[in-house]
Image (cartoon, grey):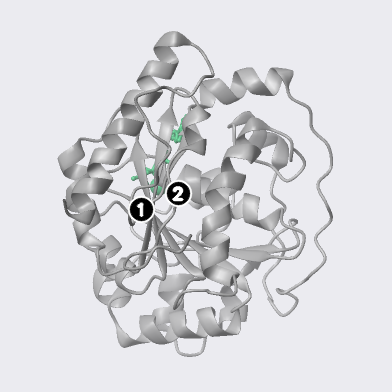
Amino acid sequence: MSTIEQAAKRLEEMRRAAADANAADAGNIPSTIDASPMPEAVLRGVSSRATHARAALAGSSGLGAPARITPFAHATRPRLDIDFATLKRMFFLTPDAPQSMLADEFRIVKRPVMRNALGPAKVRNGNLVMVTSALPGEGKTYTAVNLAISVAMEYDTSVILVDGDVAHPDVPNILASPRETGLLDLLTNDRLAIDDVLVPTNVENLAILPAGAQQGRATELLASAQMQRTLNELSSRYADLVIIFDSPPLLPTTEARELATHMGQILMVVGADSTQQHAVKLALSAVEKCEIVLMILNKAAKTDIGSYGGYYRYGTPRD
Ligand SMILES: Nc1ncnc2c1ncn2[C@@H]1O[C@H](COP(=O)(O)OP(=O)(O)OP(=O)(O)O)[C@@H](O)[C@H]1O
Ligand SMILES: [Mg+2]
């Protein structure tokens, strides 16, 4: 069975398990899933917001550990004050709620990502992490923003969230970040440096790189040599950082495929009830050149599935 077929099969098992768990309304591990890992993919579960809302009622919150490093000291743009209360109302992760159910889910999601990006056996360009999906609306932006915040909650790790969905940037709608001057401008204006476009935030170790001025030729720009140079600079200058790209969906756009060619890791978000298996297979085949592809089952009815699945890189199992 090919890697993609195995991934799709495992995904189907995960879905069934999520449905079973929901029907039974119990936290037990469904017996239809075995605990053995599936080669070359990781499957993680992120539950639906409604589940978080229920958990939040019972949950506690407190101040997270203070960030210790200021890698964005040279950024020249005004600091963005992310409004945590608004984020919380939208059921996003916030740094002041480290004990929430969502925080736990993203701890599980971020662990392999960080290991690939920064661990002793880090992969090539492993700190360039693209969050994508087969189709629109599966939760890429939700995942990218939450993952960025989760990584920023680490004591000694910093993160840049890049709005790589250049045609339909959505990060500004979530974080109220500026739309102007970002990635696409870096690709078209030689006089701009990364420090001119990065937006530091009130989360000391989180900065945002906006999508930038809209361009008719975004795909060509993302495929350009200048894009390669920009990413090389980002990846090497910020070798100790995790750089997370929110991105367009893979199947209906060409931008996402271009972006994928530069990435060290890809997180494939799969809408639990929405995405057909053949769409997932097609999307996986579109990114098969990337060494690491991790999969996240999003909007699952239960979070218990988050503990299932194994983690491998393409080629050689890493665990
Ligand atoms: N786990 C979740 N639980 C509940 N709602 C969610 C979850 N994940 C995403 N959503 C909601 O689903 C909608 C689509 O999510 P999001 O914008 O992240 O998808 P997307 O893949 O980035 O979409 P697009 O392809 O349009 O960029 C949003 O309203 C988002 O808040
Ligand atoms: Mg989006």
Residue 209 seen in the current view: no
- Most extreme residue toward the top is 24
- Amino acid type, residue under disc 2 in the picture: Asp
Q: Are marks 1 and 2 in contact (CB under 8 Å)?
A: no
Q: Is residue 195 above or below residue 131?
A: below
Give residue 115's mark: none
Query: Dividing the picture into quarters, in which one does residue 91 lie?
Result: top right
- Give the labeled residue for mark 1: 41
The residue positioned 70% from the left and 18% from the top of the image is 57
- Left/right placement of residue 111 relative to residue 123 reads right
Query: Dividing the picture into quarters, in which one does residue 70 lie?
Result: bottom right
Numbered disc total: 2
Q: Secondary structure at mark 1?
A: loop
The residue positioned 29% from the left and 61% from the top of the image is 256
Estimate the x, y position of residue 295 in percent, counting from the top left.
38, 48
Q: Is residue 225 above or below residue 100?
A: below
The residue positioned 33% from the left and 29% from the top of the image is 15
- Left/right placement of residue 57 relative to residue 165 reads right
- Amino acid type, residue under disc 1 in the picture: Ala
Q: Secondary structure at mark 2?
A: loop
Q: Mark 1 against mark 2, which lies toward the viewer?
A: 1
- Most extreme residue toward the bottom is 190
- Left/right placement of residue 279 relative to residue 310 reads left
Q: Is residue 24 above or below residue 308?
A: above
Query: Dividing the picture into quarters, in which one does residue 300 lie?
Result: top left
Mark 2 C-beta closer than 8 Å to ligand 2: yes
Q: CA distance from mark 1 to mark 2?
A: 27 Å
Estimate the x, y position of residue 71 in percent, counting from the top left.
72, 74
Estimate the x, y position of residue 170 in percent, counting from the top left.
45, 49
- Give the labeled residue for mark 2: 170
